[in-house]
Amino acid sequence: MARELQLMKGNEAIARAMIASGCDGYFGYPITPQSEVMETLMTEKPWETTGMTVLQAESEVASINMVYGGAATGKKVATSSSSPGISLMQEGLTYLAGAEIPCLVVNVMRGGPGLGTIQPSQSDYFQSTKGGGHGDYQLYTLAPASVQEMYDFVFDAWDIAFKYRNPVLILSDGAIGQCMEKLYTRDYVPRWTEEERRANAPWGTWGKPATRPHNIITSLELDSARQEVFNLKLQKKYAEMKEKEVRFEALNCDDAEYIIVAYGSSSRIAMKAMQMAREKGIKVGLFRLITLFPFPTKQLAEVAKRVKGILCVEMSAGQMIEDVRLATECGVKTEHFGRFGGIIPTPGEVLEALENKIIK
Amino acid sequence: MEARRQELLNQGYEEVYTRTKVLTDAVMHYCPGCGHGTTHRLIAEVIDEMGIQDNVVGVSPVGCSVLAYNYFDVDFQEAAHGRAPAVATAIKRLNPDTYVFTYQGDGDLAAIGTAETIHAANRGENMTMIFVNNGIYGMTGGQMAPTTLVGMKSATTPYGRRVELNGYPLRMTELLSTLPGTYYVTRQSVQNPAAVRKAKAAIRKAFENQKLKKGLSFVEILSNCNSGWKMTPVAANKWMEDNMMPNYPIGDIKVDGKIVDGIDANRLVLDHALTVMQ
Ligand SMILES: Cc1ncc(C[n+]2csc(CCOP(=O)(O)OP(=O)(O)O)c2C)c(N)n1
Ligand code: SF4
Ligand SMILES: [Mg+2]
């Protein structure tokens, strides 16, 4: 498939991007609002075209561990789920991070806690960026704000995952997963050949030839001194990501007196609120996070120096705001606005919050 | 290691027994007399004899055999507690021509990993599962396992396992044999040379079966946990024969996809007229 204009759902875009980006395997378990990912894959039957494997697992615990097994063989392996399922995957994610296995995990967030609601939410920010599972680890976390980005970020995810030997999380939400938008598809990237797999994943469990020692994939280290060295190595890797792989978008921030910080669906709403404010003569900018980890700390701090106040918009009780305040070292008035339970704030509400909480 | 061997051979020693080349030189951490070490050796011999060292991936559990990857000179992955069958499922699905095996204890396979075990078996994953049943959680200091016998003492059943409190010992192997996805299901043991020979033949069959692509091959190995049982290895093996074997009968249950003639149907529906140990 070459570059083509199509209309599709965010979840479908994820599935089609997996096939088009040379993904070798997908393992998942149904959950609203992301079931279309696996449904699309099963309908497309990529095993007959690209040779990609697709399997419905018995649980998210199983699917993430299938990702762990498959990805450890040096192949491009993915799963997707929504919040309650992602909670179940935390064990697997910490093993993947601890064994340094590249893979792709997509969370199409819904409201919580518990079974919560099937409507969109952004209340898994802490879980995604502050660990989620046990131990000191980080997932490279991308937050798409459109169906196009759902598609494109799948391609980007493989590059980062294999460059850093680290799991990549695409943190989306039910609004982007379910909405239909136009999107430009990309040229197919063929699945790796056997030679490419071995070259790209010399560490993988693909069968020990006589020419190398056996490859071991484990996150266990019983010697504390060695475990500490390993932890330091991980921290170095995360620091390098912070240095080199931060992504964000600053819109109208140059002359802004106030900025809104948001990601994903909220950033779309915030963009409209920004336009409405500008029409009223209020100079508002939008600082959109694309990577949640690594957080654009320095870049945001730079912009924040020039503004009078920051409104954080997130469909949560206020999680991202903690990183915003850390970035600015609380140097500027910063407040949170959000709605819960699957309620999506309107641009009018966001503007009102900006006026009442920040400008007034 | 090799240099020393040559030295001894040069001095005129005759080699009558040696380490298989599929085992590494790492010194095993298992308690002397434990069935894990013997079972490792049998798997390594089978891999060696089949000539598949360059095309096999093992998956180790959480349990005493967590470090199995250090002992086998083949590519290996260490799974989270109970998840080895899911891990191995994907390895095999994505690498269908590679020999894939899991190695798990009874807590790993029959308690925390019950779902992964049953579903891998039910999907008929074309791989080999080795299940070392010692009726106890060896690694964590001898707590009750799902396979602990009624009346058997452990760190968490200090007065003996009681059905009213802990339910019944779980015969996972019989249970799996009832699933159409399993192709070969057997229970073996490694407490004496005769048993070792049979266990090795079973492991060999379970590996060979992967060529047929007909489903899961499952080998339970009854083993002592002499430390956990607080017995000498010799006493532990005797105890195993007297107490474990009546509850966990040795032999093939399902061969080539069919339940073996003479297997009591009651055993398969998990009739729990279990011998209460003394
Ligand atoms: C999620 C989790 N829960 C508990 C443990 C602690 N744990 C380690 S090994 C083990 C039991 C292993 O018993 P078994 O599978 O029978 O293996 P054995 O040591 O007897 O060979 C437990 C409970 C763990 N590592 N991970
Ligand atoms: S504790 Fe038990 S299972 Fe573990 S090595 Fe010792 S004897 Fe074997
Ligand atoms: Mg055990």
Image (cartoon, coloured by chain):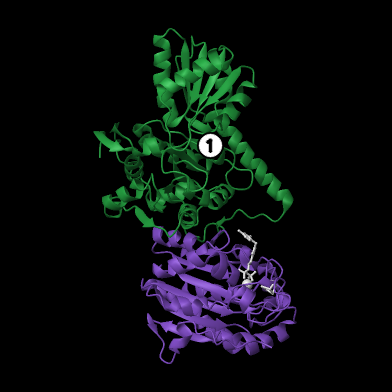
x, y (%) of residue A325?
A: 61, 24
Quadrant showing the N terminus of chain A = top left
Residue at 53% across / 65% down in the picture? B113
Q: Which chain is purple?
A: B
Q: Is residue B192 left or right of residue A208?
A: right
Q: Is mark 1 within 8 Å of ligand 1?
A: no
Residue at 41% across / 71% down in the picture? B210
Judge whether A210 appears above or below A134 on screen.
below
Q: How many marks?
A: 1
x, y (%) of residue A105?
A: 46, 45
Q: Is residue B134 left or right of residue A200?
A: right
Q: Quadrant of ligand 2?
A: bottom right
Q: Identify the residue position indicated by label 1 in the image.
A: A125
x, y (%) of residue A248?
A: 48, 25
Residue at 52% across / 63% down in the picture? B84
Q: Is residue A303 visible from the viewing direction of this image?
A: no
Q: Is residue A226 visible from the viewing direction of this image?
A: yes
